[in-house]
Image (cartoon, rainbow, N blue to C red):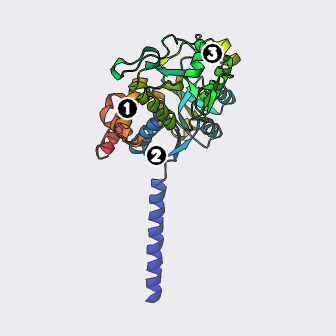
Amino acid sequence: MKKVLMVLLAMVLSLSMALTGCAEEEAGSKPVIKVTDLNWGSAHFQAEVAKIIIEKGYGYPVELVPGKTIILFQALCTGELDVDIEVWLPNQQEAYDKAMAAGDIVDLGILNNDNWQSTFVVPTYVIKGDAERGIEPVAPNLKSVADLDQAEYKELFKNPENPSKGMIMNGPPGWESEKIAIEQVAAYGLDDDYDLINPGSDTALFAGLAGAYEKGEPWITYLWGPTWIAGKLDLTLLEEPAYDEAVWEENRGCAFPSADLLIAAHKDFPDKAPDVAEMFNNWKMDTKTLGEGLAYMDDTAGEPIDAAVWFLKNREEIWTTFVPDDVAQKVKDAVAGM
């Protein structure tokens, strides 16, 4: 009798393990998709939107990998990551061209090309004043980057840590724009007169600008759009020589070219998840749309996930064009309870 019970117990255990194994195999039948979670607002926002759609609509598990531009792009090339959701060209042009030529990555399409960036952005009140706040213009003749070599402007934008020089806030460390700003300042002959100050992060960059703006202080900073702060503050881009490809390649001594924001993937990704690759082929987010998401996040003191849920609930006319109807319905059902 004991032998019979032991045999039956063994059979039940074996069957249980088999069923569990089948369930685990079924649950893990789709591979994990690793997506960049780059360290700026629009990229954080898009990463969270993509994660929800891919997990809830397509059934793939998603891992968002945080990090900086250069490191994450290298990981994309080696296959440690699957998708880079916001590649900025021309900032990353050299690395991008090299990776494409080597066949390490594939281009999934342009997500937008209506954005901007500049190393030389000032609050408009510096030039025109702000009558409502009782701020007088302190640099009414400041129009272009070429003007900055005048002693009066070096004094106006003085670096408190090094009073003999002016101060320009650079982009965060690890961004391609950080290196470009250094080259531009040198190309314009301003490197002996101005220190480029690294804020440490985009959050600190925005905080510095917002703090100066609130006090009505002179300020020069690198900035780009889409950002929530560019949409809220009255800012002016100082004039620069128009973009010229030859000059840009030589020393960056001109304005940034108009940028294309691309979605890139490791070469194997279209075979790994062809349905998700097709979604990214359809993915479009213009500057206004991204700005709305970032503004919502700032207004509500929310996280990127909060802005992503808001976007999926309130901008269905945009994201439902990325995916088939059945996928869209699954996502709608999922976010309804979020």
User: Would you say residue 241 is visible in this rendering?
Assistant: yes
- Residue at 59% x, 34% y is 198
Q: Nearer the viewer, mark 1 or mark 2?
A: 1
* Residue type at the position of mark 1: Ala
179 over 10 or under it: above or below: above
Q: Earlier in the sequence, mark 3 or mark 2?
A: 2
Residue 119 image-quadrant placement:
top right
Badge 3 density bin: few <14, some 14–19, many ≥20, Cα 10 Å: some
Residue 131 image-quadrant placement:
top left
Badge 1 density bin: few <14, some 14–19, many ≥20, Cα 10 Å: some
CB contact under 8 Å: marks 1 and 2: no
Secondary structure of the residue carrying tag 3 is helix
- Residue 149 is marked as 3
- Residue at 45% x, 54% y is 27
* Residue type at the position of mark 3: Asp
- Residue 60 is marked as 2
Cα distance in 3D space between marks 3 and 2: 55 Å
Q: Earlier in the sequence, mark 1 or mark 3?
A: 3
Cα distance in 3D space between marks 1 and 2: 29 Å
User: Would you say residue 124 is visible in this rendering?
Assistant: no
Position of residue 239 measured from the top left corner of the image (x, y, whole percent): 54, 12
- Residue at 43% x, 26% y is 216
Q: Nearer the viewer, residue 242 or 113?
A: 242
- Residue at 35% x, 34% y is 296
Position of residue 337 measured from the top left corner of the image (x, y, whole percent): 29, 47
Residue that badge 1 annotates: 295
